[in-house]
Image: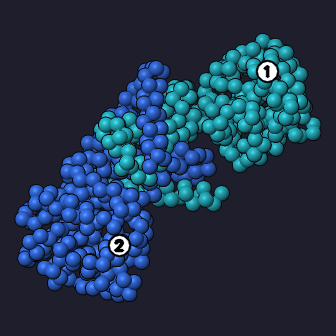
Chain colours: A blue, B cyan
Amino acid sequence: MNIVIQGLGEMGASLALILNQVADNHVIGIDINQNTLDYAIKHQIISESGSDLIMVADRADVIILATPINGIKESLKQLAGITLKPQVIVTDAGSTKNEILQVANKVLVDTAFIGGHAMAGTHKSGVAEANKDLYQQVPYFLIPNQVGKAYVERLKNIFKPLAADFTTIDVEAHDHLMAMISDVPHIAAFALMNTAVKQLGSFDNFGRYVAGGFTDTTRIAASDAKLWTDILLSNRESVLENNQALIDELQEINQTIADNDANKLQEMIQTAHDARQNLLSRKQHE
Amino acid sequence: MNIVIQGLGEMGASLALILNQVADNHVIGIDINQNTLDYAIKHQIISESGSDLIMVADRADVIILATPINGIKESLKQLAGITLKPQVIVTDAGSTKNEILQVANKVLVDTAFIGGHAMAGTHKSGVAEANKDLYQQVPYFLIPNQVGKAYVERLKNIFKPLAADFTTIDVEAHDHLMAMISDVPHIAAFALMNTAVKQLGSFDNFGRYVAGGFTDTTRIAASDAKLWTDILLSNRESVLENNQALIDELQEINQTIADNDANKLQEMIQTAHDARQNLLSRKQHE
């Protein structure tokens, strides 16, 4: 089958590398960078290259959009303007999903679209990071549109060589989950770091005193600012709700401390302790 | 010189072990547990043992109180009732200082008291954890009372074999610093964990999806509930102020996201990013 992959960064190139090893697959890579395409051909990451999605899309059985989010939205609109194979599956690799699903639902109503989000990827980027193990046992969310629902099993079968841990989910549940387990922890880390600087002055005043607790809790505050601005704003509604829930919890802890209510405070901490221990043993068990 | 150490847990026993290796020192260990004392004598952690601080305190040149905080306060009151050597230095090893300084200022007005707080210690406990390297390069705060100020250099000299990184600080600055770099990060971790459970249900619903960011940010939520209830309540004023500052920062981030103000959001994240990177390079440099 013909698999077209647009965007040969770490995520897209890894998908290409894995899928191109399957005998029946013919992977066509699309990228704006000719060096990237040359590299991908040379290393057999792809079997054919192109610079324009539209030129090859009508031959595709699967189309995977693995560019940044704005590029994905643009490509969806382009695909809506041409005739695709009737059984084609269009999927993507963006980490936030509501905007992409909105566009897909609007312009690709009669096509199977299955939004994809793999919780994989490193801080590295580029085709040279193509990694055949990138998706192994990684949570991989599938968010189908109305037509796509009937194609989920087929896509999972095509993606079997990834050895990912697939979960079919609706877009609201996906965004809510991501807000709580990824976006809000990032906000908490950003806020802790900024609060420390506001309360204590520059890190020269306190950097030498911090121990493992502060270091761990703020580690992801070193994440890329542009990337996280985009992520937080593109998942705005769920982020606002879950961040407000965190604020409410912090307020309640503060009130409990102000009330000097040792019993209630210890209960709240114990609840957190137990949940974190469960999480730990679960992750270790896996 | 005679050094009396009350409480041979990890902190006290490590102090004893290090100081007892100095030829001029005679370390007298006090503990309520006879097995602990026997172990300490057998392993030359101490040179003499006793079960009652008051029986040996009048021979002491240095008295180190290394029991839990309530025990330290009790011992300070006991010491106030007997005649100590005129040049004696009394110090302690409690991690929160305002209550201890209040008691010391009240009952030990004519004695040199220098509150001590080493940012050392592991999750282990007991005399068997005595470790001669425990304090090496560890931040070690010294908080003298009025009389104690003239004795700080002498205590640092006696403690030289610890190879700790001593900082003389007043109790308000110490408590403010601890609230921001240790207490509030713990509260944030407790609150994140509890919020996740409230928003997503039990960890069965979300545990398999969490990645490194959530795991790091909540790691210290697994801390002991009783211990942290005591710490947070004993540093109440500073904790409330710094936790409120964190809440204010989170509110501002939420408002910025609600306003869809990408420029301001990216600036806030960049500030956090830069501070965290500085912290990182500082720690790596050390």
Q: Residue at x 87, y 34 (%)?
A: B44
Question: Which x, y percent locates residue A231?
Answer: 30, 57
Is residue A147 at least partly visible in the picture? yes
Quadrant position of the N terminus of chain B in the picture: top right
Give, as a three-letter code, the residue at label 2: Ile
Residue closest to the eye, A160 or B273:
A160
Left or right: A48 in relation to B153: left
B218, above or below A119, in the image = above
What count of labels does the image hold? Answer: 2
Disc assigned to residue B34: 1
Residue B42 lies in quadrant? top right
Q: Secondary structure at mark 2?
A: helix
Residue B171 lies in quadrant? top right
Q: Residue furthest top?
A: B81
Q: Are marks 1 and 2 on the same chain?
A: no
Residue under pointer 2: A18
